[in-house]
Image (cartoon, rainbow, N blue to C red):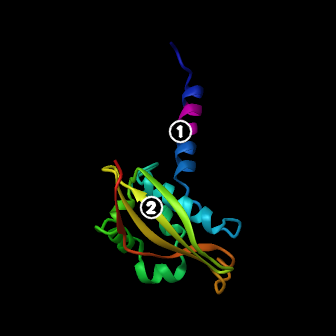
């Protein structure tokens, strides 16, 4: 089978642009709800190494509140924290469930159950707040804090 150079170039360009598009992170946006932000972060952490290593952590960092970033950053420090015993549970977890504990105009607190590959279930309290004091991020829902995990038990 003979393939022309023009076709090879087109296929090559397709793969370059497809991989670049897949690597783009979702940026803070006032159109995203607090639940949207949480789901984006959880689904990214669930598939942490797709489309590249630690893409899920990068995405989670992208949707962190500026006040949270001051405490947990820079990104390299944040990655170290996520790989610690308290938060590595989130990486490549099997499933998650979300329950709203508190909802106000400016804050949400969610209970997030995380099921690990060994069927252990932990929960985190995940707080997401609306930014009001930053012109670039004003109106965006972003994560302000995530508690340490608490063991729920094992699922058979």
Percent coordinates x, y for residue 113 in the rendering: 45, 61
Residue bounds of the magenta highlight: 9-15
Q: Residues within 10 Å of mark 2 (few under 14, many from 20)?
A: many
Q: 75 or 32: which is nearer to us? A: 32
Q: Is residue 5 above or below residue 130?
A: above
Q: As rendered, which of 104 and 82 lies closer to the eye?
A: 104
132 in relation to 18, above or below? below
Q: Earlier along the polypeptide chain: callout 2 or callout 1?
A: 1
Q: Is residue 53 magenta?
A: no
Label 1 sits on residue: 15
Residue, far front = 156
Viewer-side residue, 42 vs 151 = 151
Q: Residue furthest bottom?
A: 133
Distance Cα–Cα, label 2 vs label 1 = 37 Å
Can you see residue 27? no
- Mark 2, secondary structure of its residue: strand
Query: Where is residue 139 drawn, in percent x and y?
Result: 69, 77
Q: Position of residue 134 (x, y in %)?
A: 64, 84
Dot 2 corresponds to which residue? Answer: 113
Q: Is residue 125 visible?
A: yes
Residue at (50%, 58%) from the top-left corner? 97
Residue 10 inside the magenta-drawn segment:
yes
- Please state which of the two labelled residues, at mark 2 or mark 1, is closer to the viewer: 2
In the rendering, at what x and y percent does residue 96 appear? 47, 56
* Residue at 47% across, 78% down: 69
* Disc 2 to disc 1: CB gap under 8 Å: no
Image position of 76 (left or right of 133): left
Q: Which labelled disc corresponds to residue 127?
A: none
Query: Going by the picture, which residue comes out furthest to the left?
Result: 85
């Amino acid at each position: 089978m003979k393939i022309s150079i023009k076709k090879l170039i087109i296929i090559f360009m397709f793969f370059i642009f497809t991989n670049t598009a897949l690597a783009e992170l979702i940026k803070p946006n006032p159109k995203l709800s607090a639940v949207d932000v949480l789901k984006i972060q959880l689904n990214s952490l669930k598939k942490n190494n797709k489309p590249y290593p630690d893409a899920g952590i990068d995405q989670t960092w992208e949707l962190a509140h500026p006040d949270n970033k001051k405490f947990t950053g820079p990104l390299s420090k944040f990655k170290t924290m996520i790989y610690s015993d308290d938060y590595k549970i989130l990486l490549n977890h099997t499933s998650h469930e979300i329950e709203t504990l508190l909802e106000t105009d400016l804050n949400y607190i969610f209970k997030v159950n995380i099921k690990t590959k060994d069927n252990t279930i932990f929960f985190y309290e995940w707080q997401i707040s609306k930014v009001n004091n930053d012109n670039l991020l004003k109106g965006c829902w972003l994560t302000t804090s995530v508690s340490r995990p608490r063991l729920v038990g094992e699922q058979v």
